[in-house]
Image (cartoon, grey):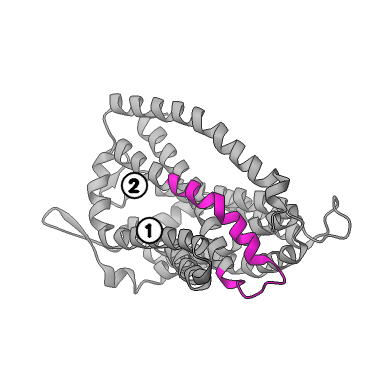
Amino acid sequence: MPDALIAITVLWGFVFIYAVMATMDFGAGFWSMFYINHERTRATNIANRYLSPTWEVTNTFIVALVVALVSLFPKATYTLGTILLIPGSIILLLLALRSAFLVFSNAIPEYKKPLTYISGITGIIIPGLLISVLPITHGHYIEYGDGNATLNMVKLFTSPNEYAFVGFAISSSLFLSSLLLADYSKVSDEMDAYQVYLRDGRILGPISLLMAFLIMLTLKYEAAWLYNRMIDNMPLLWVSLGFFLLVGVGLYFPNPFAKGVRGMPRLTVIAATAQYLVASYVYGKAHLPYIVYPNVTIHSAFTDPYSFRVVFITYIVGFAILFPGFFYFWSLFMQDKRYLKKK
């Protein structure tokens, strides 16, 4: 496998890990806000209990993503930095604002509600802005002059494809987080919250699927090169749809391992993650070899081979050290009975 392909696979791995973790994190922040006045279901308590130890961990992956981009594809950094200057600055501002208000909402009880509202609203705006990076890289909204690339903001925010991506990001954030919080509610034995999040997952699943179809429909007219390449991998798209149907089984069918309980939340989380993994693979493969269509490719932007090998070995060593720690963190988070039963 060529070095550039290995490098983009590493980068895309960071993108996928952060995308899944961040959507669950941002969605949980919204649910914490949404159910703040529904004390009987304890849905907000479950969302806050999930957010408390995880949002700091999630933010480490966006740092790893930026470092990977700069170290593996330094020649793409200038172009991406130029065209993403405005949306990127807004994203960083909202991330900082959300993080600050999450901290203060737990530290200052008398202002907990307004702070939770602000962190919840910013948390649902951020995924929509983050996913805007994808349609921007399709090249349809970039103008070139005097050797410099500029982003046409008017063209971007009047594009149906942009809003299809934004709608998909928001619905997916709420969908994935509702599935995870349903699972978390069940292991915490908070069955009222479990029923609430299970219901939310049933509502948001079809909406997310509709948004995915709208992305494909608008791609056909705004980025035909990408649409045609994705259609070439239609069997994998059917596999992705199959995982979505498995999510439906987990949402609606009785649990054979828990008598009297409808729904299999652990199955839904695993199947939904697999669905997004397959779909993102199809999208990423179709996007190759372009980082920014049509001028920046993985080959033209790639670092020199010696630097790549050094960086790649560093990543291997780093993950060999960090991965057991992350695994232990999540196992404690999902299995520590004292924390799960905390009121």
Q: Which mark is residue 290?
A: 2
| Residue 51 relative to residue 98: left or right | right
Residue depicted at 41% across the width and 60% down the height: 100
Residue 279 visible here: no
Position of 295 with respect to 4 (left or right) is left
Residue 54 horizontal/vertical position (percent): 54, 50
The mark total stands at: 2
Q: Which residue is mark 1?
A: 96
Q: Is residue 311 visible?
A: yes
Q: Which residues are magenta?
A: 33-61
Q: Disc 1 residue type?
A: Ala
- The residue type indicated by label 2 comes to Tyr
Report the side of 44 relative to 114 (left or right).
right
| Residue 45 is one of the magenta-drawn residues | yes
Q: Is residue 303 above or below residue 123?
A: above
**Residue 56 placement (x, y as % from top left):** 48, 49
Residue 269 among magenta residues: no
Identity of the residue drawn at 67% across and 46% down: 334
Residue 151: x %, y % from top left: 25, 62
The quarter of the picture where the N terminus appears is top left
Q: Which mark is residue 175?
A: none
